[in-house]
Amino acid sequence: MICDGEDNPMCIAGVFGGLSSGVTEKTTRVFLESAHFSASKVRKSSMMHNLRSDAARIFEKGSDPNICLTALYRAVELLGEYANATIASSIVDCYPNKMEPTKVQLRPTKLNDISGITFEKAVIEKILSAMSMPFSKESDYYLVNVPTNKADVTREIDLIEEIIRIFGMNNIPYTDRIQSAISFTQKPDPHTIHESVGNFLAANGFLEAMSLSIIPSQKYANQEALIKINNTSNVHLDAMRPMLEISLLDNIAFNINRQQTSLKIFEFGNTYSVNAIGDFEESQKLCIGITGLRYPEQWNTDKKKQIRFLLHQRHRRSHFILGRHKKFEF
């Protein structure tokens, strides 16, 4: 905020002016301020208050901090030329931390690799001079002083982009040869398995749940096995979950309390634990929850058939079964 001498707000810096500080037809004295504001803070203020002004759009992209005096002189000149204004005071310049040009190394070999052509050194130097970027020659690179009016040029790749832009993309030849890289993943691929299992469950009427990885520690009896955290925003969520079952049961209870008694839900999520040597471990697991009626209530289904399954041990292999002879079905 920009305030007056009594801390009364006058405007939001770089975003929006205030009514009390505006100019009207009766204004006879004007205080001119030429300022530079932080691009990131202007962006945050503009988005937070939903004020997308012209000033915010300009400042959030990065303005030149060293042009303030030039802009002030020009404003005074225009006021004197078109409004017969006279200067009432001297300039007060508050610039505690002067911003110097950024020094960036430019390697011609890197420029050639990125662009795909070989740049002559004379061409590189001509483009740098045209962009008002002083440079010095080193053994295998240029040390370039990037002026403060180019706030987005801070790395070598940014400088290469500027050189290619000035040189012209249409001046870079292309060939008929196509190059591509073969990508592959190790088997089994966790992402593929995740997608396949999720699609299978969704096709069988299951809905996917997504729960927080942080949970209230009071829900677990074994407090020593929990990984505690200091959550200042939500103090009751003070631990990382060691299992998915509690999260899924919370979801089931939430739905049952709202008359949704027949549920088929699943959740992919991470669990957190401490191993025998005291290191933290993160594991990805799948948890499935089913309750209520086996089929939706329709005229051609058994409305009273509940979902239930038993674990039957046979020939050293586990099978989920329904009733006495049927395998477990979704």
Image (cartoon, grey):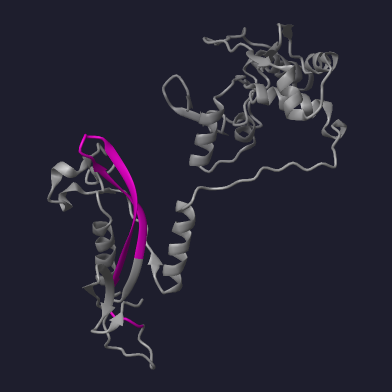
Q: In the rendered image of this protein, does residue 167 appear above or below residue 68?
A: below
Task: Please tell me which residue is depicted at 82% across the width and 23% down the height of the picture.
Answer: 118
As drawn, the residue found furthest toward the front would be 315
Q: What x and y, as percent, mark residue 192?
A: 49, 56
* Residue in front for this viewpoint, 216 or 322: 322
Q: Which residues are magenta?
A: 266-295
Residue 92 is at least partly visible in this image: yes
Q: In the rendered image of this protein, does residue 38 appear above or below residue 241?
A: above
Q: What x and y, as percent, mark residue 298?
A: 38, 89
* Residue in front for this viewpoint, 319 or 222: 319
Q: In the rendered image of this protein, does residue 215 appear above or below residue 93?
A: below
Task: Please tell me which residue is depicted at 45% across the width and 19% down the height of the picture.
Answer: 5
Mark count? 0
Q: Quadrant of residue 121?
A: top right
As drawn, the residue found furthest toward the left would be 221
Q: In the rendered image of this protein, does residue 12 appear above or below residue 67?
A: below
Which corner quadrant holds the C terminus? bottom left
* Residue in front for this viewpoint, 148 or 281: 281
Residue 162 is at least partly visible in this image: no
Q: What x and y, as percent, mark residue 156?
A: 66, 21
Q: What x and y, as percent, mark residue 172?
A: 84, 32
Task: Please tell me which residue is depicted at 71% across the width and 6% down the height of the picture.
Answer: 139
Task: Please tell me which residue is depicted at 15% across the width and 49% down the height of the picture.
Answer: 218
Q: Main secondary structure of the magenta part?
A: strand
Q: Is residue 267 magenta?
A: yes
Q: Is residue 171 magenta?
A: no
For this view, does 272 lie left or right of residue 86?
left
For this view, does 236 lie left or right of residue 126?
left
Q: Quadrant of residue 244?
A: bottom left
* Residue in front for this viewpoint, 260 or 114: 114
For this view, does 116 lie left or right of residue 27?
right
